[in-house]
Each structure stands twice: as structure tokens, then as C-alpha cells.
Amino acid sequence: GAPRLVSHFRWQATQGTVTAFTDSGWARCIRTARSTSGGVVTIGEHTIKTYCRQQKVVALSSAEAELYAMVAARQTLAIAAYAKDLGVSLDCELYCDSSAALGIAQRAGIGKVRHLRTQGLWVQEVRVSGRIVYRKVLGAKNPADLMTKHMSAELAGQHIATLNMKIE
């Protein structure tokens, strides 16, 4: 019901980190049972990219869907690579609200998980190589929820404010 969403890019000091927030809506598509991945990529307080897309595979658990949403870390790595081409070195970090997905990302190999695609192993490899640091964020503080879940107008407003955006 609002005509536009405005992103504000206020002056900020030089930043050293690209930050991503990811979330998943498990089996959101009624027709295909595929999950939805959503994410936000920021540099400091500047929102660089937001996205929402259907996952290509059918996740058999919410943890698996969250793990596949973490594969979006490639967006973070791409932005860091673009910055490096411009002579700016940026670290990468990814926030996820799923303890189960973070647990899979922190281990080496598939462990007790019975159905894990190579994307899950890629998430582990990127962590081991030190290219991305994974961190936990509370579900109520994860702005990527805007792309995957229904929520109250108040919570949506809080997430929009976190991203330095305003509905006008």
C-alpha cells in the first residue's frame, strides 16, 4: 500500500567487512514443495543487494533449506572480489538464524546428515579456508526474514529501518 521504498546511503567511514544475512522459508511453494532463499548483503550501513528466489532443489528439512540459503554467501564473496579489483580489501561474514544449519557449516564432512548436496560441503570449505565467517543472529533481528516470511507491520518496519530504508 506504499508507493515506494527508499534506500538511504548516508556518509560512513571506510568499512572493512561485507556482511550478509540469509534466511529460508522451508517448502513455501505449495505446488513444488521447494523452499525460498532470501538474503541481504551490506557494507556497513549500506544495503548493496537484496534477493528472494526459489531454491532449485527440494530440501528435506528446514536445516537443509537454511544451509542452501547460506550458499548465497557467494554474493558476499563476489562483492568482496569487486572491491579487491578496486584496491579495497574486505572481509566477509554471514549471519544466519538457524542453529542447525550453522552446526552443519561448522563441522567437516556430512557427519550424520543423510542427504547433503555439494552446496553444503562448499559452505564448509569456504569457512575452513577463512574466506567467510559464519555467525548466529536471532530470528527477530534477521532482516532477511523480509524476503521469506509473513510478519507484522511493526517487525517489517524494524527490519526496513535496520537496512536504512524507508517507506514513502
Image: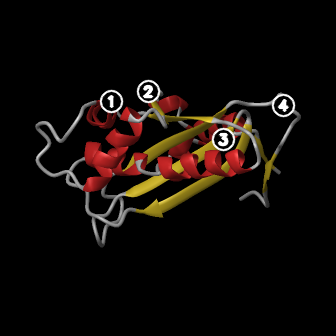
Whether pointer 1 and pointer 2 mark residues with C-beta atoms closer than 8 Å, the reply is: yes
Residue 103: in sight, yes or no? yes
Structural distance between the alpha carbons of marks 1 and 2: 7 Å
On residue 136, which mark appears?
Answer: 2
Determine the residue positioned at 75% across, 57% down.
2
Q: Earlier in the sequence, mark 1 or mark 2?
A: 1
Structural distance between the alpha carbons of marks 3 and 2: 16 Å
Structural distance between the alpha carbons of marks 4 and 3: 13 Å
Single out the residue that lies furthest toward the right: 11
Quadrant that contains the N terminus? bottom right
Structural distance between the alpha carbons of marks 4 and 2: 25 Å
Residue 132, placed above or below residue 25: above
The amino acid type, in three-letter code, at marker 4 is Gln
On residue 99, which mark appears?
Answer: 1
Question: Secondary structure beneath disc 2?
Answer: strand
Structural distance between the alpha carbons of marks 3 and 1: 22 Å
Structural distance between the alpha carbons of marks 1 and 4: 32 Å
Determine the residue positioned at 75% across, 43% down.
87
Q: Earlier in the sequence, mark 3 or mark 2?
A: 3
x and y percent of residue 117 in the render?
23, 55
On residue 42, which mark appears?
Answer: 3
Left or right: 33, with 160 as reference point: left
- Count neighbours of disc 3 (C-alpha within 10 A) and say few if under 14, some if 14 to 19, many if 20 or more: some
Q: Earlier in the sequence, mark 4 or mark 3?
A: 4
- Count neighbours of disc 4 (C-alpha within 10 A) and say few if under 14, some if 14 to 19, many if 20 or more: few
Which of labels 4 and 2 is toward the front? 4
